[in-house]
Image (cartoon, grey):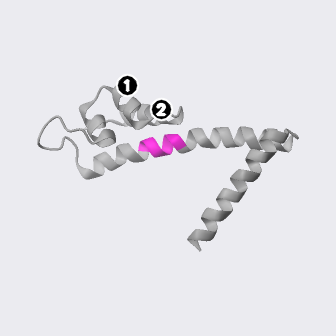
Amino acid sequence: MITKDQLKEIEQFAEMQFCKAEIALMMESEEVNEALCGKKTKAKPLLSKDDAETIRRAVRRGQLKGEAQVRKAVMTQATQGATNAQKIALDLVMTRKEIDDEDE
């Protein structure tokens, strides 16, 4: 069973952009390894599908939080006139528009 503290730690590692395999290694948990890497050490799964999905969502949430911090810094620099940041910001806007248009 995965604890709230473990989920928080998983999310924090993901926020720093560690990959799933690295997170599993740092967590030193068979359950996390199974959920993130699909490697089972026993014939029977250690986690329910819902618990495994909860771990994967924690990773994705952390990745997005980390990405949001970087995007915020880029947007701040772009509005202050940094040319490189402005280009990155425009690329982000265009990517978002393409994704939103696909959803409509």
Whole-angstrom CA distance, mark 1 to mark 2, is 10 Å
The answer to whether residue 61 is magenta is: yes
- 92 vs 76, left or right, is left
Seen as rendered, the residue at the extreme bottom is 104
- In the picture of the structure, the residue carrying the numbered disc 2 is 18
Count all numbered tags in the image, as a single digit: 2
Percent position (x, y) of residue 79? 84, 44
Q: Are marks 1 and 2 in contact (CB under 8 Å)?
A: yes
**Callout 2: SS:** loop
In percent of width and height, residue 91 lies at 72, 52
* Residue at the image point whose x is 35% and y is 32% from the top: 24
Q: Main secondary structure of the magenta part?
A: helix
At x 34%, y 27%, the residue is 25
Left or right of 45 on screen, residue 32? right
Q: Nearer the viewer, residue 29 or 19?
A: 19
Q: Which residues are magenta?
A: 58-63
| Residue at 87% over, 40% down | 80
Q: Position of residue 13 (x, y in %)?
A: 47, 31
| Kind of residue at badge 2 | Phe
* Residue at figure coordinates x 60%, y 63% from the top left: 99
Q: Amino acid at mark 1?
A: Met
In front of the other: 3 or 94: 94
Q: Which residue was labeled with disc 1?
A: 26
Circle 1 sits in a helix, a strand or a loop, which is it?
helix
Earlier-in-chain disc, 1 versus 2: 2
Q: Residues within 10 Å of mark 2 (few under 14, many from 20)?
A: some
Is residue 43 magenta-colored? no
With 30 as the anchor, is 56 left or right in this view? right
Residue that protrudes farthest toward the left in the picture = 43
